[in-house]
Amino acid sequence: MLNKVVQWPVKIKDRVVGLWQGSGDEAVESKSWIKLGVAALASLLVIALITGIFWSTEPAPFSVHDNALESVAGDETKLVTGVATTATLIRISDTLLSKRGGYLSNDAIPPGVWLDNIPSWEFGVLVQVRDMNKAMREAFSRSQSQSTEDKDLALAESRFNFDNRSWLLPPTEGQYKEGIEYLQAYLDRLVDEDQQNAQFYARADNLRYWLSTVESRLGSLSQRLSASVGQKRLNTDLAGDSEATQATSAPSEMVVKTPWNRIDNEFYEARGSAWALIHMLKAIEVDFADVLEKKNARVSIQQIIRELEATQQTVYSPMILNGSGFGVLTNHSLVMASYISRANAAIIDLRELLSQG
């Protein structure tokens, strides 16, 4: 009995070798199946690679005016205050779901699960969608702090704040589609003359509210992009207030550096945020035209848009490079940080200008 057990591995080995090296029809058929399997696997990998490259193309910009006009079925009389901003927010949100490859951040199978640049781009866009939706609910649609918030905008905000990587039960795409539907319901009421329960107040204080959020987002992006080469920074957390305190102590000097495997993610998140902001600012230029004209601030918002448009230039390198500051290789993150920082500085100036009487 023991002898039989010992002979089993030897018999199995002889069988496999015989299938591969044998001269009979059985060996030929076995080799054919192996070659066919290898060829099929290689073909699937090539198809996945080509599909991944195709899906990694960022969406093209769109015309804010044409999109707003399309949202009201071409009726220019319905282009009331708030239509441009709301229609732009809807279009940006829909682009997340309808672009090439659809929504990729929650993909669980190849090639989507292998991609990270476009999911980072999607997150940058999503952050701006969330911030704009919040500003519309808390400021743009309310006449004062004690007024009632718009029901559709509140429901839309909750949908867009859903986990951006949920694959199932429920999927992220379903929640964001519902958010778009609630935004559309608000837009439908906004342009309906028979309904007065949907408003959009284009006031300087409302605009400053949203710009303060944009300022914080761009400031964070700029710091993370600049940290690609590593920096020694002095702790300025409590600067300017001798009585200020913080929860836990922190060193007076620290080294800040973005991990090497996060550099391309930060870069494409910044590109996504800038892409969304370009369209939102163009919509703001339409809906807040009178406010900007009164403050002589139209040129300021146009300069911000121009700085952000520079972030959308074609990246010719096959990968995001991280050369040292003045080294031989370029540093894409520092170039992006430069444009983001200049746009952020212009937003700070614009907020101060809007605060003046």
Image (cartoon, rainbow, N blue to C red):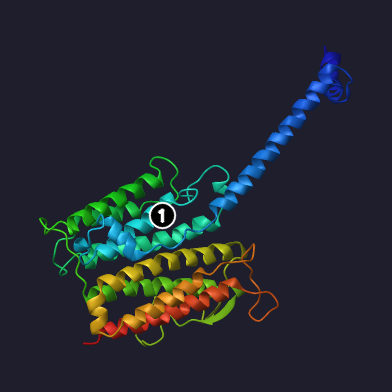
**Quadrant housing the N terminus:** top right
Residue 316 visible to an observer of this rendering = yes
Which residue has dot 1 on it?
A: 95
Q: Residue placed farthest to the top in the image?
A: 1
**Helix, strand or loop under label 1:** helix
Residue at the spot 79% in from the left edge and 21% down from the top edge: 29
Report whether 198 appears left or right of 129: left
Can residue 12 be seen?
Answer: no
At a point 25% along the width and 82% down the height, the residue shown is: 293
In the figure, is residue 327 to the left or right of 283?
right
Question: Which residue is painted at 64% across and 68% down in the image?
Answer: 321
Q: Position of residue 292 (x, y in %)?
A: 27, 80
Q: Is residue 41 above or below residue 3?
A: below
Neighbourhood count class around disc 1 (C-alpha, 10 Å): few under 14, some 14–19, many 20 upward: some
In the image shown, does 267 or 311 lie closer to the viewer?
311
x, y (%) of residue 8?
A: 82, 18
Which of the 4 quarters of the picture holds residue 74? bottom left
Q: The disc labelled 1 sits on which kind of residue? A: Thr
The image shows residue 247, relative to residue 20, as above or below, that is below
Q: Residue 67: image x %, image y %?
A: 33, 60
12 with respect to 280 (left or right): right
Q: Residue 231, located in which quarter of the rendered image?
A: bottom right
Residue 349 x %, y %: 35, 84
227 relative to 172 in the view: left or right: right
